[in-house]
């Protein structure tokens, strides 16, 4: 989905409005949710969106390294100005959300975004539908 | 003060020791038991670093004093930051540690408020938080939920430690939980740490050792003891004039030839001596 649509539907506050504007038409198809930045570094899908509680400055370095397009801070967490500044320099779209991580990720999944492993549902790497094959 | 004339000697320091006050630590971690075990294991310096409190530090110092000041006890704390990073604060004296700790502990909810209607459930899940005297007798229990993370950011925690002229150390940086790397992915150079600690779990020759050495920070090795048997299983070997906080700070700075041996070398030495 387009980044600007995502921001609108999830009622996100753009913390780096210039970046959000220039990335508005970007098609986001994947996402990741984690508060452990070591995990984000290792597993977040490039081109995706990150949902996290973590507001430390390292979020920006890790997100850039992982090639993420946008970061959504959940549960009303607000990063310090230096974090926002660094994100603006890196061209990363930062958003604030009042909703918690579970709510945001659930909605993003409804919108068609998927995680990095893709082992649930019809997005499995081998093309088979997952859940129907489970069980006896 | 600098004792430039005095001979430098190697001292064994285990700067990460919990007492029974930490909910996750064994009740056997009493001031007399800790200090006796430290002497048995040949430790010259220990630092008491309970989670988010310094409530048993004075008692451990007193227990050591009762045995002729062996080992030298550094007053410390292990702060859980908002990022759930563990930071060791090592202070020049007990009063400084207690002042810093008071600010930290005040940020935590009370144990009784966590599980309404279940006054002891916190203890069931997380463990007892026993305040002890120098003889190891219970003198009460800590009411703040020490097992939880505080709302202090990493930067605020380091600033709080520095405000009391303390030394801020990134705890067990090789661990997969509650470490700078696990929580923040990369080591934040701007955080203002004075040192970093590797745990007893870091294996010799680990490729990460080089990464840690490249941080440009003094590297300590602490046991993070929660049980007596863990005390002194690893330690830092510090060449300094005497076991004191002042000497420790000079040692971190490398002043007058003082130095820390590489943590892995210290472990080798330990193996040797015990053989």
Image (cartoon, coloured by chain):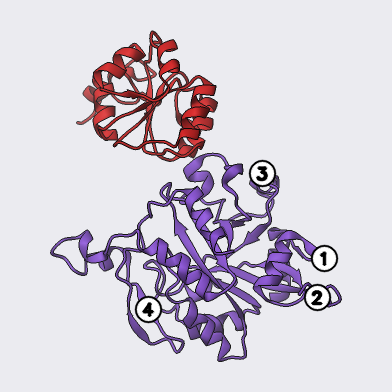
**SS of the residue under disc 1:** helix
Circles 1 and 4, Cβ within 8 Å, touching? The answer is no
Quick one: which chain is purple?
B
Secondary structure of the residue carrying numbered label 2 = loop
Q: Nearer the viewer, mark 1 or mark 3?
A: 1
Marks 2 and 1: CB-CB under 8 Å?
Answer: yes
The mark found on residue A122 in the picture is: none
CA gap, disc 1 and disc 4: 40 Å
Dots 3, 2 in contact, CB < 8 A: no
N-terminal of the two: label 1 or label 4? 4
Q: CA distance from mark 4 to mark 2?
A: 37 Å
Residue position for label 1: B256
Q: Earlier in the sequence, mark 4 or mark 3?
A: 4
Query: Disc 3 sits on a residue from what chain?
Result: B
User: Marks 1 and 4: which is nearer the front?
Assistant: 1
Location of the C terminus of chain B by quadrant is bottom right
> Relative to residue B272, is residue A57 drawn left or right?
left
Comes first in the chain, label 1 or label 3: 3
Q: Which mark is residue B131?
A: 4
Q: Residue at x 49, y 39 (%)?
A: A38
């Amino acid at each position: 989905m387009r980044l600007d649509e995502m921001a609108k539907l999830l009622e996100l506050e753009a913390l780096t409005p210039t970046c959000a504007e220039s990335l508005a038409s970007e098609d986001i198809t994947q996402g990741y949710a984690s508060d452990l930045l070591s995990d984000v570094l290792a597993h977040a899908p490039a081109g995706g969106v990150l949902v996290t509680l973590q507001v430390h400055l390292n979020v920006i370095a890790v997100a850039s390294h992982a090639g993420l397009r946008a970061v959504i801070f959940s549960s009303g967490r607000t990063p310090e100005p230096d974090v926002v500044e660094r994100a603006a320099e890196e061209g990363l779209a930062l958003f604030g959300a009042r909703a918690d991580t579970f709510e945001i990720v659930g909605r993003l999944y409804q919108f068609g975004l998927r995680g990095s492993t893709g082992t649930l549902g019809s997005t499995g790497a081998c093309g088979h539908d997952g859940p129907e094959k489970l069980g006896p | 003060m600098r004792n430039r004339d005095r001979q430098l000697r190697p001292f064994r320091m285990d700067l990460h020791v919990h007492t029974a006050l930490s909910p996750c630590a064994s009740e056997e971690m009493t001031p007399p038991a800790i200090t006796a075990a430290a002497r048995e294991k040949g430790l010259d310096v220990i630092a008491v670093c309970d989670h988010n409190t310094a409530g048993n530090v004075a008692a451990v110092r007193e227990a050591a004093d009762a045995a002729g000041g062996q080992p030298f006890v550094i007053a410390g704390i292990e702060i859980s930051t908002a990022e759930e990073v563990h930071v060791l604060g090592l202070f020049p004296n007990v009063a400084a540690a207690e002042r810093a700790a008071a600010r930290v502990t005040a940020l935590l909810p009370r144990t009784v408020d966590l599980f309404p209607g279940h006054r002891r459930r916190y203890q069931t899940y997380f463990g007892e938080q026993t305040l002890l005297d120098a003889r190891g007798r219970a003198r009460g229990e800590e009411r703040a939920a020490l097992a939880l993370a505080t709302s202090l950011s990493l930067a605020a925690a380091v600033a709080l430690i520095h405000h009391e002229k303390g030394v801020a150390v990134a705890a067990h940086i090789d661990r997969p939980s509650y470490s700078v790397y696990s929580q923040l992915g990369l080591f934040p150079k701007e955080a203002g740490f004075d040192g970093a600690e590797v745990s007893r779990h870091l294996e010799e020759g680990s490729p990460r050792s080089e990464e840690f050495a490249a941080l440009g920070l003094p590297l300590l090795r602490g046991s993070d003891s929660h049980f007596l048997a863990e005390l002194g299983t690893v330690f830092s070997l510090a060449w300094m004039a005497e076991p004191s906080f002042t000497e420790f700070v000079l040692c971190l700075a490398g002043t007058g030839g003082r130095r820390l041996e590489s943590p892995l070398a210290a472990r080798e030495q330990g193996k040797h001596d015990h053989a």
